Structure formats: C-alpha cells, structure tokens
Amino acid sequence: MFQLDDEKIKRLEEKAKDIRISIVEMLIEASSGHPAGSLGMADIFAAFYFHILRHDPTKPDWQDRDRLILSNGHICPVLYASLAHSGYFPIEELKTLRKFGSRLQGHPDKNFLPIVEISSGPLGLGLSQVIGMTLADKINNNNSSKKYFYCFLSDGELQEGNIWEAAMLGGKEKLENLIAVIDRNNIQTVGKVENVMPLEPLEDKWRAFNWNVQTIDGHNFKEIIEAVESTQKSNKPSIIIAKTIPGKGISFMENDYRWHSRPVSKEEGEKALIELKKDNA
Amino acid sequence: MLNQDLKLNSKIFSEDAEKETNRKGFGEGLVLAAENNKNIVGLTADLTRSTSMDLFVDKYPERFVQVGVAEQNLITVAAGMAEMGKIPFVSSYAIFSPGRNWEQIRNVICHNNLSVKIIASHGGLSVGKDGASHQALEDLSLMRCLPHMTVLSPCDVFEAKKATIEAAKIDGPVYLRLSRDKTPQITTEETLFEIGKAQMFFNPPMIAQAGIISTGPIIYKALQVAQKFAERGISVKVLNISSLRPLDFESIINLAKEAGAIITVEDHQIVGGLGSSVSEVLAQNYPTPIEFVGVHDQFGQSGDPEELYNYYHMNISHIEAAVEKVLGRKK
C-alpha cells in the first residue's frame, strides 16, 4: 500500500496542484471562506486521497473503508476539492461552495453531503468522534478487515478543552489504528498560535498523554507517507504533527495569518491562479 | 378517583406506598433493552453507580466505556459510536450533561440526528443537600428547544424503565430526566407507556373544575392535592406528561376545554419547562388561565427536598393555593 517511487510522488504533486487550483476557484466564487488552512493542507489531502486511504469513490458506503474525519471543518474547500478530484462528485459542483441549496455547505454538513464522514466546524470535537468510531469498531471486533481511522485537526483547535479530554481517553484505550494529523501552521483567526495561546512543547504534551508522536514536513510526500506507515508499528494511538505553510503555493498568502478567513477577491484570485498554474508548467 | 384503567398503584395514597428511585428503573430498562439489541453501548463520565449504569456494566463490560469526569467527551465519543451504528446510552448528572455539553449535543448529536440517549440523573430540587450547583433546574428547557430531540421525564421507577426501553427503539436522540431520591411508585409494571401520550392519572367522575398538568415525581404532590379537593367535592383532574417532546397537544387542549383553568407543577424553572410548554400549546389553541408551580427564576440551595419544596413554594399547600387562585380567575 505504501510503495512509493519518484513517478508516484510526481503524480501526487500534480494532484495537490489541481486541488489548490480548485480551492482558489471555489473561494473566488464563494467570496468568503478560509483560504490559508485549505491551501496549506492540500499536499496532505492529496497524499491521503490518492495514496494512503483505502476507499472507493464508487462505493462511499463501503463498510471496510478507512475513515477520514476532518475536525476543523472550516478548511472544507480542500476536503471538497479532494473528494471531487477523487471522483465522488463532479468537479464543476465545487463552484457551488457556500451557496444556497448547495451540497457544499460552509462547513461540512452530512445532512447535505452524506459522503463526508461527519459534519464538522465547531472546533475541538472531531478527535472525540473519531475515538468513538474507533471504539465502536473495536467492540465489533471485526479483525477480518482492519481499517484505519484518521483525524485531521488544526493546531488552533488544540486550545479547546474537549481535545484534551479526548487525548486522555485515546491514550487510555490504546487505539492503535487511530492516527491524528495536526496541521501545525501556527496561525489562527487573530494571529500566530504561539502568540495567542502557546502550544509548545507540543510533542511532549501528546507523549505525556500516551500517544505515539512524530513531527514531519507537511509538504513532503515521502515524509507524510512514511510517517503514516510507521504508525503501524505502534500499539498506541498516533499523532503526526505536520508542519505546514498556511496559504502554501501563493506568495502573497503564505504565512500571513490574515488569510485564515479572509475572502479572496476576483483580482487576488486571478493572481493566485497565475502563480499556481505557472508552477504547474 | 385514581384512573384505574391505567392500572396505577392502588396503595398510592396510603402511608406504606412503595418507594424507589427512577434511576433504578433506567438501569433495569437498559439491561433489558441491551439483551434485545447488541448495538446498545453504555458510557458514563465517572458516575457509574449513581446513575445506575452499574447494572449494565456488570452484564456487558465489553460494551461499556468509562470516559472519566469529561462530559464534553462523553457526548462526542458517543456521537462517533453512533456514526458507526451503535446506540449509545450516556449517563451523568443533568447539571453537567446537558448542562456543560449543550453545544456538543446541539451541533453533533441533534444536527446529525444521531441515536444517542442522554440519561441525566439528579434533576430538580429533589437533589437536596448537594445544593444549588448540583440541582439542574434548566435541563428540560435546554433539551426541548432542540430539533430531533425526544424529551422524557418519567414520574417513577416503572415509567423510567419503560421510557428507557422505548428510547432504545427511537432512531434519534433522546433526553431522559431522572431524579436522585426514592419517590412513590405511582404506576405499576402493567401501566401502559407510550412516548408522546399523556395520561390522566386522577380522573374524578365529574367534569373537572381545574386541571393540573405535571411531570416527573413531583406529580405525587399534585395527586395528593387533587385527592384533597375531591374530598371537598371539587373535581380537579391530574394529567401526567412523561413526554415533553413530542408533547400530547390533544390531551392538554381537551383538559383546558373541560376545566377552563390549568395549573402546571414541575421540579424545574417555569421558564422553558413544562409551564412554558403548556402555555405555548394553549396560547395558540385554547387560551386558558394558568397558574405555574415550579422554580420562579431562582437558584436552589442545600436542604432536605421537602424543606426546599416549602421554601420555593412548590409543596402541597402551594399547589392548593394555585388551584384556588386559578379557580378565581375562571370566567
């Protein structure tokens, strides 16, 4: 499952570019939404949807699929783009993001789009839900087809108390097939995470809660995939702290916290698309 | 005057009427429900024995999750289990669940119509000596405003047991309010229980001059008041609301039409609870004078439950006074 060569990495890079282009196109059309986190997580989403996840876009209800839960639902443009580029729904539909009647609600809503694993948006709740899912699977004791439960979190949402209640339970229950990826982009609505409410030493925190911890470059496909692979050796739940660049790929957005939730104007969007497409050539 | 069609406890007005906690009814009901449905799982936030979850844990330890003192996690972990097809029953005290985790209940459970059953003990002033911080007086209000939620408030051990079994059959969220102390057994094993149906517990053969509508164990006081009025030749009927949502509009409207005067009695804030519920129904369908017995915009304190019911004007004499007052308001 995890075999990787240069050609595969190149293909994943192309997928990530396609996803980023879709994100910008969606955000221009929606004239609201969250650009920085969506763009920063595009490589990780590409690695999961096009390499790591065991899933089948033609059978979204497949019982034995791996589960990928997005906790910080505000970066849903990257989720929707990944689903569309995987073939779950037409890429054209991405332009309905945040519009009345759209399946692509401002935050993922299972009532509108049942193929998302959970509705999300209120911060700090996804890790508990994925723990519940993993526990339910453990009770079913369905070892014939071991599946993995992945949860994507933002670093800012680690400021929510609910997260640390979940951290305690995950450590206690030794959920070895649970892997959480933290988008360590160091931005939140009002500024840098480390200024607003410091999380460091973040690795130590998770280790102290009895999780298996690694830190990686969230834009390096080899590191992303090898990190996920290495969690299979752990008998604890795993945390992968993925250092990412918010706004990645667009020079005037990168590392600027103001792009956390700033609308992308048509002009800005077109500039961004030129940058993304130029890199593609 | 007790409605014998309902097979209520005939000893109810005698000194030696049996008492039991409705928590125990939940615990027994959960074990019965779990025998029939292997998808039922149990979770608590520390409070295993004091919510009677221990009966389930003894029988199905592999289907139980202890999350520790963490009510937000309690709800969100249960949500994840429900997403995988489980039917989680989560128990705590009402002040903490739904008190502390309302946003998780709203956004995760109700919005997604997940089949999570929220079991909340220690509702009302009946908690007694623990004091204000542990007396949930707002929980019914918090739960009945949520789309998809079923809200149940059983009056005794048998209703609690049946409510638990019925809750397991509903494909969606349920809130079940329980109380701390042993309270009189008003119904029996044989009394029918149906979610969404109110029952006329006290039913004098004459046309009612006033109607009391009540919920939870405090209805016992309402029954005693109705009995006293009956001895004076005044017909006061008592309607038991064990299901606040769905609410039996028809029974409430019919009682209002018959009696022309209503008193609500609840161990909860008037605002948002049963009094508000009945007012909403009648204001729209059959405007009727109503008097409210319950907590009027205050917090509780330590004391024996009876001392508290006296202090907060929720005891037998106060219900009697409310009946007299509403009778005087009738046109």
Image (cartoon, grey):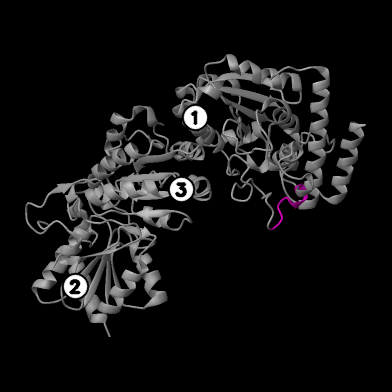
Establish if A101 lies above or below A85. below
Does residue A164 appear in the picture of this structure?
no
| Residue A167 image offset from top left, x and y in percent | 51, 28
| Residue farthest along the bottom direction in this orientation | B331
Q: Are marks 2 and 3 on the same chain?
A: yes
Looking at marks 2 and 3 on the same chain, the residue that comes earlier in the sequence is marked by: 3
Which dot, 2 or 1, sits closer to the camera? Answer: 1
Q: Amino acid at mark 1?
A: Asp
| Residue B37 image offset from top left, x and y in percent | 37, 39
- Mark 3 lies on a secondary structure that is helix
Residue sitting at x 53%, y 22%: A144
Label 2 sits on residue: B236
Label 1 sits on residue: A137
The numbered mark 2 sits on a residue in which chain?
B
Between the residue at mark 2 and the residue at mark 1, the CA separation in whole angstroms equals 54 Å
| Nearer to us in this view, B331 or B202 | B202
Whether residue B215 appears in magenta in the rendering, the answer is no
Horizontal side of residue B52 vs B225, given as left or right: right
Establish if A86 lies above or below B184. above
The numbered mark 3 sits on a residue in which chain?
B
Residue span colored magenta: A94-100
Label 3 sits on residue: B102
Q: Amino acid at mark 2?
A: Val
| Residue farthest along the left direction in this orientation | B15
Residue sitting at x 43%, y 37%: B74
Callout 3 crowding tier (Cα within 10 Å): few <14, some 14–19, many ≥20? many
